[in-house]
Image: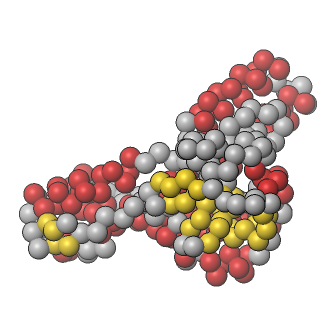
Amino acid sequence: MKIKQLQIQVPDYLTIGQYARMNAYKGDSNFGRLVHVVSSLTGFSKEEIRTWDVESLTKVSNLFSGLADHSNEFHALLEWNGELYGYANVKQATLGEYIDIESLSEDLENNLHKIAAILYRPVVKHRFKTLSYAYKQKVKMLNNDVENVFDWYEVEKYDSNLRKEREEDMKGFPAHILLGAISFFLSNAVLYLNHIQYSKGEITKIQMETREEEILENLSQNIGAGGGLFTTSLSPIYYQYQATPA
């Protein structure tokens, strides 16, 4: 679509790299923020964008407005760039994974792509006879209906050197999928600590169940479509079902 001699290509989804660049703006000016966001999404320099008229800037901004409306979703398995990637089950995570995630989270804004390379790794083995996919924003998400999906596949063993080789490519990974995975990861950690507190007698059963209900309700809003995990088991992992077929 052309906007006054400009050829604009609207992507199917917001990438991690675009998301990080968009959120890097620290100024207070609404106009400056808009210029920064448009620059982050289109690749045009801020200097060039400042030469546009307001109508062109508004039209370009509206073209991309839908990208920000996509809700964050957790998907255990998806095909990206022609390769099957799986969420690395935190129940089986190594100490190295936890240490690296904790370290990288200190500067989350600039390290999202590195965390993505930890949480999503190539699938090296799976038990599915055939793979059924749901398509959304041209992302292929596994849609097989199985119980405890984490038992159905294995991802590449964690290696920090391999992660460093792959992390730049992960800047192109769908931001809403990663944000859903981070929400899932954190919520599982909170649920686990909630049960630890109960087992130590620090909170009552009613307090534990009330907290759990609140966390699960909040998490369920970010987990859906093909690939979400839905049950409320009382022991990690808390979501044990692959999504229902579309």
Residue toward you, 123 or 196: 123
Image quadrant of residue 241? top right
Q: Position of residue 154 (x, y in %)?
A: 79, 64
Image position, residue 93 (x, y; %): 81, 59
- Give the residue at x 38% y 51%: 68
What colour scheme was applied to this rendering of the protein? secondary structure
Residue 2 rendering spot, x and y as whole percentages: 15, 68
The residue that appears at 67% across and 50% down in the rendered structure is 144
> Would residue 244 be visible to someone looking at this image?
yes
From the viewer's perspective, is residue 189 above or below residue 218?
below
Q: Nearer the viewer, residue 234 or 243?
A: 243
Q: Quadrant of the C terminus?
A: top right
Question: Which corner quadrant holds the N terminus?
Answer: bottom left
Judge from the rendering whether residue 105 lies leftward or rightward of residue 21; answer left or right.
right
Residue 132 location (% of width, % of height): 63, 56
In this view, the residue farthest toward the right is 200
Q: Is 163 placed above or below 35 here?
A: below
Q: Residue furthest front?
A: 129
Q: As rendered, which of 128 and 236 lies closer to the eye? A: 128
Left or right: 40 as drawn, with respect to 125? left
Task: Reply above or below: 196 against 132.
Answer: above
Residue at 73% across, 76% down:
160
Which residue does the image show at 75% across and 59% down from the upper left?
Answer: 128
Q: Residue furthest top?
A: 206
Tell me if I can see residue 189 in this picture: no
Tell how many labels. 0
